[in-house]
Amino acid sequence: MTLKYDDHGRPYEDLTDENKKLNHRIKELENSLSIALEINDKFQRENEELKKDLARAKEDHQYDNLVHQKELKELNKK
């Protein structure tokens, strides 16, 4: 902080430099947040796709099991 004097000779703290630093830091944090949100969106989309793939795989597995059970019953009848 810099001590300055107004027109009447009264001292005050000049916070201009600190304000510039804080504004710069805010912009950095906003950029970081923006990047984090983009990454989060990407992972959300990937997660949804993986959930869909898992559901399809479970359905396929269930269908295969039914087919195999039917085949085993037919083999046992012979």
Image (cartoon, rainbow, N blue to C red):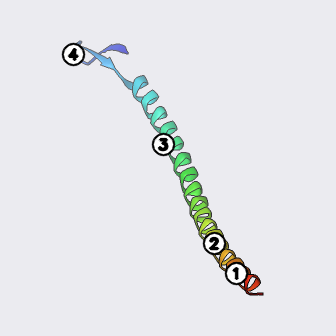
Q: Earlier in the sequence, mark 1 or mark 3?
A: 3
**Foreground mark, 4 or 1?**
1
Is tag 4's residue or tag 2's residue first in the polypeptide sequence?
4
Q: Secondary structure at mark 2?
A: helix
Q: Secondary structure at mark 1?
A: helix
Q: Which amino acid type is shown beneath numbered disc 3?
A: Glu
Residue 50 placement (x, y as % from top left): 62, 62
Name which of mark 3 and mark 2 comes first in the sequence. Answer: 3
Residue at 56% in and 64% down: 48
- The residues tagged by marks 1 and 2 sit, at their Cα atoms, a distance apart of 16 Å
Q: CA distance from mark 3 to mark 2?
A: 39 Å
Q: Position of residue 57 (x, y in %)?
A: 65, 69
Frontmost of labels 1 and 2 is 1
- Label 4: how many Cα within 10 Å (few below 14, some 14–19, many 20+): few
Q: Secondary structure at mark 4?
A: loop
Q: Quadrant of residue 8?
A: top left
Q: In terms of depth relative to the viewer, which is nearer, 76 or 10?
A: 76
Q: CA distance from mark 4 to mark 2?
A: 78 Å
Q: Which residue is mark 2?
A: 56
> Which labelled disc corresponds to residue 30?
3
| Residue appearing at x 45%, y 36% in the figure | 26
Residue 78 location, x and y as percent? 78, 87
Front: mark 1 or 3: 1
Residue denoted by label 4 = 8
The amino acid marked with disc number 4 is His
The Cα atoms of the two marked residues, 4 and 1, are separated by 94 Å
